[in-house]
Amino acid sequence: MRGQRPGKWKRRLAIVLVTLPLYTACSASWLKFSGQVRDSDWRTASREPAGLAPDAATTPEAVVQVYSARAVRWRGYFGVHTWIAVKPEGAAQYTVHEINGHRLRRSGSALVTSQRAADGYWFGNRPELLGELRGGTAAAVIERIEAAVAAYPYSATYRIWPGPNSNTFTAFVLREAPELRVDLPPTAIGKDYLGIMPVGKLPSGTGGQISLLGAAGVAVGLEEGLEINVLGLTFGVDPGSLALKLPLVGRLGPRE
């Protein structure tokens, strides 16, 4: 029996070595075919509004929205970029908070606050609305969001993997705004980065997680379901909506 063990491990390794490239190739082809990832020139790619945000000029109430979109160029096959847009009551435009690694090289900070379109295409890739609040609840949450943005501890650091990156920032801010109950996509690589602290709240505020520098961990929450982080890649299941969570392709199944 002992002599058979090396053979079993070799077979398992062979299965993994065949399955991973096949899964990656099939996932990339599906993302390309479905139009989720576009290989357009980032300099000319669309940043126009997608029609998901209410018009600030005709919406007097406060609004908070959280978005994700596939990242730029080849990165889009592996993950998404996320951001938060806020509009205080009576404001004539939205303010968008996000992390952009390219800005770090020029300004010493990756944190970007701008008045770009809240629901703008991310260099040609269509955004998805992950969560929204309006009215009095949104007005109260905006104060905490602005405080969390100012307190973000990694604005001078950026790593695509395993973080801190744009998704680390969004997750950090969302932990101070649990009213949104946002379940960040499994493709939001970096969302599990907690720094040196191995234990923390989930961004949705409905559970907790253990994470080793964003490279390995486990999370359990009412919104997220069960997630396992392996080398920054998320595998999981959401029993509430019978959805699977997989690397590259993201969530398979409906949202609640």
Image (spheres, rainbow, N blue to C red):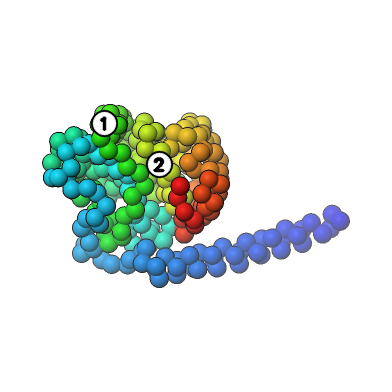
- Mark number, residue 115: none
The residue drawn where x is 16% and y is 38% is 60
Pick whichever of labels 1 and 2 is earlier in the sequence.
Answer: 1
- Mark number, residue 182: 2
2 on left or right of 65: right
The residue drawn where x is 38% and y is 45% is 167
Number of marks present in the image shown? 2
Q: State which quadrant residue 173 falls in.
A: top left
Residue 179's place in the image compared with 230, above or below, is above
Q: Which element is circle 2 on?
A: loop
Question: What kind of residue is marked 1?
Answer: Gly
Residue 142 appearing in the image: no
User: Does the CB distance between marks 1 and 2 fall below 8 Å?
Assistant: no
- The residue that mark 1 highlights is 136
Percent x, y for residue 210?
53, 36
Percent x, y for residue 16?
62, 61
Q: Residues within 10 Å of mark 1 (few under 14, many from 20)?
A: some
Percent x, y for residue 70?
36, 57
In-front residue for pair 131/118: 131
The residue drawn where x is 33% and y is 62% is 73
In-front residue for pair 43/238: 238
C-alpha separation, residue under disc 1 versus residue under disc 2: 18 Å
Q: Residues within 10 Å of mark 2 (few under 14, many from 20)?
A: many
| Labels 1, 2: front one | 1
Percent x, y for residue 249?
47, 59
